[in-house]
């Protein structure tokens, strides 16, 4: 039977619960255990799919097409275990399931309540879709003491009671501040947070103390005493120099050792930290820097393009260069400024996006990259914009656009249901806007001898999608005659998946999101190739 590890957070948010859970998962996996990680989010949205990246950072997409919390991205990147739909739940989803059931009379006249109905549904989620896993790590979003997370805390308390303490472990991650004025490390916030957790019926077994400075033994003893946790289980995590050092740091602090000891287990094989040591060294010692411009709507929010930022860094690691991301807000980018803004960049990237705001700035930047032969990567919306730019400036279709943005344009990008044989809009059939996203893994066939085929070294690929609009395949010949080739197509040849420009050293647009599949230890070939091209650009 699986063993369950619950990770809660205290004192403040953004302490790195996701990274801690992901690192622990790597350490256990690397010692021969089968691990699964899941996340419970206390907000009322059914999933983060409709949330603006300003609210909650990037929406991470799984192979099976779930729109999930970005922490699942950390999990995948650190463990290389593909997350599934069944690995993320929100309060909104729970209530929506319960209310649907209630409307169908499935509760047989009972009063539907938080306890037991909501907590039962959470307990179901924790156990769902588990087969031969040795460990299931469940992270609870938010901070202990929040009203919203109360049902989750109660549910894990009940769950632990059900499966037994020998099959469940509670880890609490807290913040241990250092006060400069008194030159002291303060344990009181941790004591209070643990007190709060205990008042909800949970005694943590391990406390991870996030701190800017190493915590002296005396303070550790204090935490151990006041929080009723064995001194060996008071584990510190001091800010690391790069996130790739996190698994090494947790190993040095014996987090995995204490977890295995708790469950009376021994490592099944010798741990391998070499890959992390190697990339930490590369990241810290690389001198050569290249500038990559990311032109998007949400560039000012750190986590809005989390997987993309990571994938670019992975590409840099693979090419021994430091990637300096220059984030440019697309709606502030005037066509007249483009040459000045992009003059020192070695690569231009237009990420995924929705809606009209900022599109003209993106199109001008694409034009500049195309004409000046700067390596260009367009992802999803970025590919759609590249197609529109080419249609306007090379095919001379002046009103070329996307029906997402302008109903009156010449739709080189639109909804599949909108096309007729001539590639023009069929009026009145766009009622399926909404709820029609292409989500998750889809196959693309790659054209023989194309740049993309050389990059992937394969005839067929599987990549994750998250979009509603498509490039109009009826215009394929027109584009190809002028040098933009549709080098990747869906297996039925209906949907353009990849475009590239023949007489350009590196100009690629992809309808999918390759960033979701890039891992620090196995960088994505598309990002590695993009960074390589940028490295040689100047
Ligand atoms: N808005 C575009 C679409 O829905 C692109 C989406 C994206 O970039 N993820 O097709």
Image: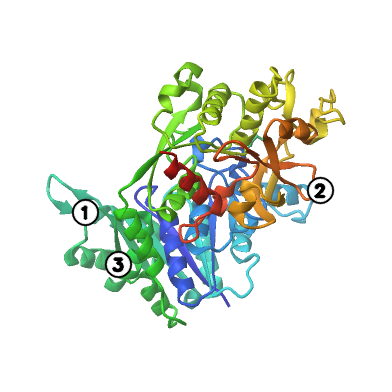
The residue labelled by disc 3 is 234
- The image shows residue 353, relative to residue 6, as above or below, that is above
Q: Residue at x 41, y 73 (%)?
A: 272
From the viewer's side, name the closer residue of 115 and 65.
Answer: 65
- The secondary structure type at the circle numbered 1 is loop
Q: Which quadrant does ligand 1 occupy?
A: top right
From the viewer's side, name the closer residue of 478 and 316.
Answer: 478
**Dot 3 crowding, Cα within 10 Å, few <14, some 14–19, many 20+:** many
Of circles 2 and 1, the one toward us is 2
Mark 1 or mark 2, which is nearer the start of the sequence? 1
The residue labelled by disc 1 is 186
Q: CA distance from mark 1 to mark 3?
A: 14 Å
The residue labelled by disc 2 is 492
Does residue 302 appear to the left or right of 454 in the view shown?
left
- The secondary structure type at the circle numbered 2 is loop
**Dot 2 crowding, Cα within 10 Å, few <14, some 14–19, many 20+:** few
- Image coords of residue 193 (percent x, y): 34, 55
From the viewer's side, name the closer residue of 347 and 216.
Answer: 347
Q: Is mark 1 within 8 Å of ligand 1?
A: no
Q: Residue at x 62, y 60 (%)?
A: 125
Can the viewer see residue 66?
A: no
Of circles 2 and 3, the one toward us is 2
Q: How is the image coloured?
A: rainbow
Work out which quarter of the rendered image holds the N terminus and state it: bottom right
- Image coords of residue 83 (percent x, y): 59, 59
- Image coords of residue 448 (percent x, y): 70, 51
Does residue 144 appear to the left or right of 135 in the view shown?
left
- The secondary structure type at the circle numbered 3 is strand
**Dot 1 crowding, Cα within 10 Å, few <14, some 14–19, many 20+:** some
- The image shows residue 362, relative to residue 248, as above or below, that is above
């Amino acid at each position: 039977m699986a063993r369950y590890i619950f990770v809660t957070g205290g004192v403040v948010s953004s302490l790195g619960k996701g990274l801690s859970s992901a690192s622990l998962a790597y350490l256990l996996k690397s010692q021969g255990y089968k691990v699964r990680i899941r996340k419970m989010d206390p907000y009322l949205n059914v999933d983060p799919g409709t949330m603006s990246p300003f609210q909650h950072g990037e929406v991470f997409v799984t192979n099976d097409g779930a729109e999930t919390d970005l922490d699942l991205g950390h999990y995948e990147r650190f463990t290389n275990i593909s997350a599934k739909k069944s690995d993320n739940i929100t309060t909104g989803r729970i209530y929506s399931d319960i209310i649907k059931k209630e409307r169908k009379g499935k509760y047989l006249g009972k009063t539907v309540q938080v306890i037991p109905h909501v907590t039962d549904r959470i307990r179901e989620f924790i156990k769902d879709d588990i087969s031969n896993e040795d460990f299931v790590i469940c992270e609870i979003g938010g901070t202990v003491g929040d009203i919203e997370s109360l049902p989750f805390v109660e549910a894990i308390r009940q769950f632990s009671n059900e499966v037994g303490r020998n099959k469940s472990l509670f880890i609490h991650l807290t913040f241990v501040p250092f006060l400069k004025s008194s030159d002291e490390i303060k344990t009181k916030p941790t004591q209070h947070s643990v007190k709060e957790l205990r008042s909800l019926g949970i005694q943590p077994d391990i406390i991870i103390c996030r701190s800017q400075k190493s915590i002296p033994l005396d303070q550790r003893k204090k935490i151990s005493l006041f929080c009723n946790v064995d001194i060996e289980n008071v584990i510190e995590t001091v800010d690391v120099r790069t996130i790739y050092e996190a698994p090494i740091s947790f190993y040095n602090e014996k987090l995995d050792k204490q977890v295995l000891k708790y469950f009376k287990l021994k490592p099944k094989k010798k741990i391998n930290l070499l890959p992390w040591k190697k990339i930490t060294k590369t990241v810290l010692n690389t001198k050569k820097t290249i500038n990559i411009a990311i032109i998007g709507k949400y560039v000012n929010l750190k986590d809005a393009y989390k997987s993309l930022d990571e994938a670019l860094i992975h590409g840099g690691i693979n090419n021994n260069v430091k990637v300096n991301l220059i984030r440019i807000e697309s709606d502030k980018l005037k066509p007249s400024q483009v040459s000045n803004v992009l003059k020192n960049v070695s690569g231009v990237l237009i990420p995924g996006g929705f809606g009209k705001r900022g599109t003209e700035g993106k199109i001008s930047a694409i034009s500049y990259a195309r004409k000046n032969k700067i390596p260009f990567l367009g992802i999803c919306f970025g590919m759609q914009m590249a197609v529109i730019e080419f249609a306007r400036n090379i095919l001379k279709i002046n009103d070329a656009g996307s029906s997402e943005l302008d109903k009156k344009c010449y739709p080189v990008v639109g909804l599949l249901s909108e096309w007729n044989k001539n590639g023009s809009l069929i009026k009145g059939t766009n009622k399926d806007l909404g709820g029609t996203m292409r989500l998750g893994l889809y196959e693309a066939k790659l054209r023989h001898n194309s740049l993309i085929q050389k990059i992937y070294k394969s005839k067929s690929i599987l990549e994750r999608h998250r979009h509603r609009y498509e490039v109009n395949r009826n215009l394929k010949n027109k584009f190809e005659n002028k040098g933009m080739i549709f080098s990747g197509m869906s297996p039925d040849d209906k949907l353009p998946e990849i475009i590239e420009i023949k007489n350009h050293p590196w100009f690629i647009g992809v309808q999918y999101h390759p960033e979701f599949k890039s891992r620090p230890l196995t960088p994505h070939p598309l990002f590695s190739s993009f960074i390589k091209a940028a490295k040689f650009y100047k």
